[in-house]
Image (spheres, grey):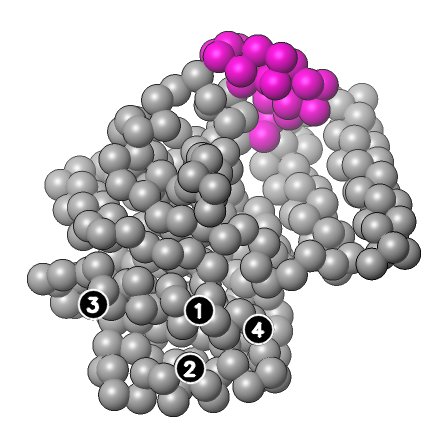
């Protein structure tokens, strides 16, 4: 089989259905499967999706009785995947015409590429800046958090994180692409032992790119074709806010802590959790008025 497409559903019935339909409508002339993992939604969305696609042999459903996170759910499906390549696809995207076919053709034609990501646009037509990034080293993160990246958006030095000085429609190697659309050689995925399950949500995509590059493969941004991303559709709450900043700490501890000095370690932890508490305060204030 050419391709296994993995989609994780968590209480996003309408969007998940839309994502599946966009795949079925746009993928042509390849042998593929769609594996939909329900992360214990308990809202009836799984049952409705099964009913909607009961006559579609390409779509298979996997029920997870516990919500142990995005990485766990993807790994669960990957164990059953039969494709030579695997596409991790968010449940809140619309796949545009030829995007999957052209992306698959490109990665097949370049065996040095371990992971490929496409251009990701938001519903308003603007670029989702997370779709091509550099790894969040201390220097790269400092430029971003200090505001220098916004002040000098076309600077190669100051805007390494979001790479806004590069052509968003281009094709080139990057450090990492976003998990909303992540096409990976299945054999490379196995060498990485799948996604790191210590990440509940967020960060597992950057971590996988890091591991792939450690193995000697390249990560590529393929900006010729795109998807539309309805970002944050699984909800924004205190738990997810915590997991977002926790993922930063996990990644830093795993890849940079030993290399950086004690002082940089302290600055990093203070920055991560300082930002978390500021965001939490604003979230609590917002909740008071909604």
The residue drawn where x is 36% and y is 39% is: 119
In space, the residues marked 4 and 1 are separated at their CA atoms by: 9 Å
Dot placed on the residue nearer the N-terminal end, 4 or 1: 4
Identify the magenta region: 136-159
In space, the residues marked 4 and 2 are separated at their CA atoms by: 11 Å
Mark 1, Cα crowd under 10 Å, few <14 / some 14-19 / many 20+, is many
* Residue assigned mark 1: 16
Dot placed on the residue nearer the N-terminal end, 2 or 1: 1
Q: Nearer the observer, disc 2 or disc 3?
A: 2
* Residue assigned mark 4: 11
The residue drawn where x is 32% and y is 83% is: 53
On screen, 114 above or below 16? Answer: above
Horizontal side of 182 relative to 224 (left or right) equals right
Residue 83 in sight here: no
Q: Of all residues shown, which one is farthest toward the left?
A: 29
Query: Where does the image place residue 275, in percent across and percent down from the top left?
Result: 79, 36
Whether the magenta-drawn stretch holds residue 152 is answered as: yes
């Amino acid at each position: 089989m050419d391709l296994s497409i993995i989609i994780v559903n968590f209480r996003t019935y309408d969007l998940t259905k839309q994502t599946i339909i966009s795949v079925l409508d746009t993928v042509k002339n390849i042998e593929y499967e769609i594996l939909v993992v329900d992360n214990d939604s308990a809202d009836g969305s799984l049952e409705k999706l099964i009913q909607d696609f009961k006559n579609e042999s390409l779509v298979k459903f996997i029920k997870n009785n516990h919500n142990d996170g995005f990485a766990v759910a993807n790994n669960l499906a990957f164990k059953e995947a039969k494709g030579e390549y695997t596409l991790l696809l968010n449940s809140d995207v619309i796949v545009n015409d030829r995007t999957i076919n052209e992306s698959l053709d490109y990665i097949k034609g370049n065996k040095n590429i371990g992971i490929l990501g496409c251009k990701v646009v938001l519903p308003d037509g603007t670029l989702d800046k997370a779709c091509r990034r550099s790894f969040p080293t201390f220097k790269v993160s400092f430029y971003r958090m200090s505001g220098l990246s916004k002040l000098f958006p076309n600077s190669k030095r100051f805007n390494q994180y979001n790479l806004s000085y590069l052509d968003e429609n281009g094709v080139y190697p990057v450090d990492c692409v976003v998990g909303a659309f992540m096409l990976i050689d299945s054999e490379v995925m196995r060498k990485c032992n799948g996604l790191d399950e210590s990440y509940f949500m967020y960060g597992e995509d950057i971590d996988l790119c890091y591991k792939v590059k450690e193995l000697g493969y390249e990560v590529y941004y393929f900006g010729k074709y795109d998807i539309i991303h309805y970002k944050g559709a699984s909800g924004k709450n205190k738990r997810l806010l915590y997991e977002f900043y926790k993922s930063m700490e996990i990644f830093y501890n795993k890849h940079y802590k030993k290399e950086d000095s004690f002082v940089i370690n302290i600055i990093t932890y203070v920055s991560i959790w300082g930002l978390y508490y500021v965001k939490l305060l604003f979230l609590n204030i917002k909740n008071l008025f909604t």
